[in-house]
Amino acid sequence: MEANQSEFNMAFSYLNRLNSLFYYASHHAMELNAHGWFHSVLAIYRELTPYIEDDEMKEKNKKMDEINFMISQNTKKHQQSGTNTIDTKLYREIHDFELFLRMVLKRTGLQMRMESDPSKALQ
């Protein structure tokens, strides 16, 4: 049985959602908000899960646990000192995780190339 076709394509909604999540991730990164940044990256990860290879998922799931522990430690330090800093290693780990997700976007074609004619970008 063939599925019903819709005039409404979810691709725009999906790409808009990804764009919003990357915006929030960038915003939190610039504010050195490790907790917000990491959770924005995790939301992107959930969206991209269908495009991530099984071996990559296993590796990234372990990395998520490590980062989560580091964030807990960073939060404790932040609460004790009252300063808004982020450990360099934690920053690099979240940064690398986000870069991995951006590479997934690129290799799957979800990150569209710029076109001089916008109508060609959607073809």
Image: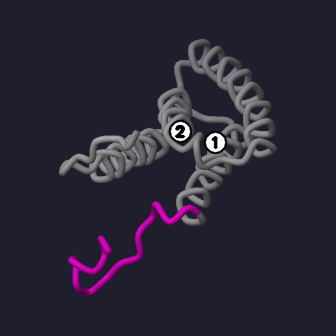
Classify 117 as above or below 69.
below
Give the color scheme: rainbow, by chain, secondary structure or one colour.
Answer: one colour
The residue positioned farthest toward the bottom in the image shown: 116
Q: Which residue is mark 2?
A: 41
Amino acid at pointer 1: Ile
Amino acid at pointer 2: Val
Between tags 2 and 1, which lies in front?
Answer: 2
- The answer to which quarter of the image holds residue 86 is top right
Q: Which residue is mark 1?
A: 94
Q: Nearer the viewer, residue 111 or 41?
A: 111
Residue 68 image offset from top left, x and y in percent? 68, 24
Residue 114 image offset from top left, x and y in percent? 35, 78
- Quick check: 36 left or right of 58? left
The residue positioned farthest toward the front in the image shown: 1
Specify start and end residues of the magenta stretch as a single range: 108-123
Q: Residue at x 47, y 30 (%)?
A: 36
**Magenta stretch contains residue 112:** yes
